[in-house]
Amino acid sequence: MESVKVKDHMNSRPIHFKGTETVVEAVEKLLESKSSGGAVVNDEKRVIGFLSEQDCLKAMLSSTYHSGEASKCVSEVMSTETMLVKPYDSILAVAEDMLVSKPRVYPVVDDDGHLVGSLTRTLVLSALDKHLHSIYEKGSHFV
């Protein structure tokens, strides 16, 4: 399982934000893409934060009490502490991290911090499922 790598299962066209979008614009992008969050990148495509549905929900809920909150920029409501993974990381290691950490989406970055993909819990489950099926199929040949 250590040989199963993130790069083999990641979404290589991840949703991302520049940080200048309003929360309302970001929500529309999240809803269109059916994603629960996305990396926020600078002009060099380096990850500088992460915007989750929860960040958006908090800002939009707050706007019902304080007008204008939903017009804040993504950079004002994003999380700056972001769990990142590398393309060469083991899916098994990421799955173990997911038991402790709660992000649903992990930005995948190269060694220079540039966004190259994203990995979701669903993609990790799919990778584990494929791996387990391959083990069962190999085992059934010997019966």
Image (cartoon, rainbow, N blue to C red):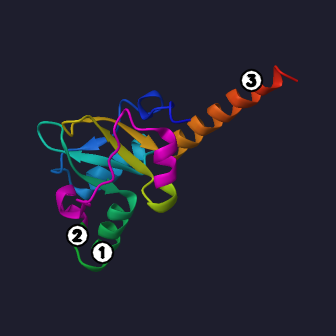
Assign a secondary structure to mark 3.
Answer: helix
For this orientation, the residue located farthest to the top is: 141
Pick the residue in front: 51 or 88: 88
Query: How far apart, in angstroms, are the residues tagged by discs 1 and 2?
Result: 6 Å
Left or right: residue 36 versus residue 77 is right
Residue 37 locus on image (x, y percent): 37, 51
Per the rendered image, the range of residues in magenta is: 70-97
Left or right: residue 66 versus residue 135 is left
For this orientation, the residue located farthest to the left is: 43
- Residue appearing at x 29%, y 80% in the figure: 65
Q: Which residue matches tag 3?
A: 138
- Which image quadrant for residue 18? top left
Residue 59 locus on image (x, y percent): 29, 68
- Which image quadrant for residue 52? bottom left
Q: Which residue matches tag 1?
A: 62
- Which mark is nearer the camera, 2 or 3? 3
Q: Is residue 139 above or below residue 51?
A: above
Left or right: residue 89 versus residue 22 is right
- In reply to whether residue 74 is colored magenta, the answer given is yes
User: Can you tell which mark lies on residue 142?
Assistant: none
For this orientation, the residue located farthest to the bottom is: 65
- Give the amino acid type for the residue marked by disc 2 in the picture: Glu
Q: Which residue matches tag 2?
A: 69
Assign a secondary structure to mark 2.
Answer: helix
How many neighbours does mark 1 have within 10 angstroms: few (below 14), some (14-19), or many (20 or more)?
some
The answer to the question of whether label 1 and label 2 lie on touching residues, with beta carbons closer than 8 A, is yes
For this orientation, the residue located farthest to the front is: 142
- Give the amino acid type for the residue marked by disc 1 in the picture: Ser
Left or right: residue 141 versus residue 70 is right
Query: How far apart, in angstroms, are the residues tagged by discs 2 and 3?
Result: 56 Å
Of mark 2 and mark 3, the one earlier in the sequence is 2
Assign a secondary structure to mark 1.
Answer: helix
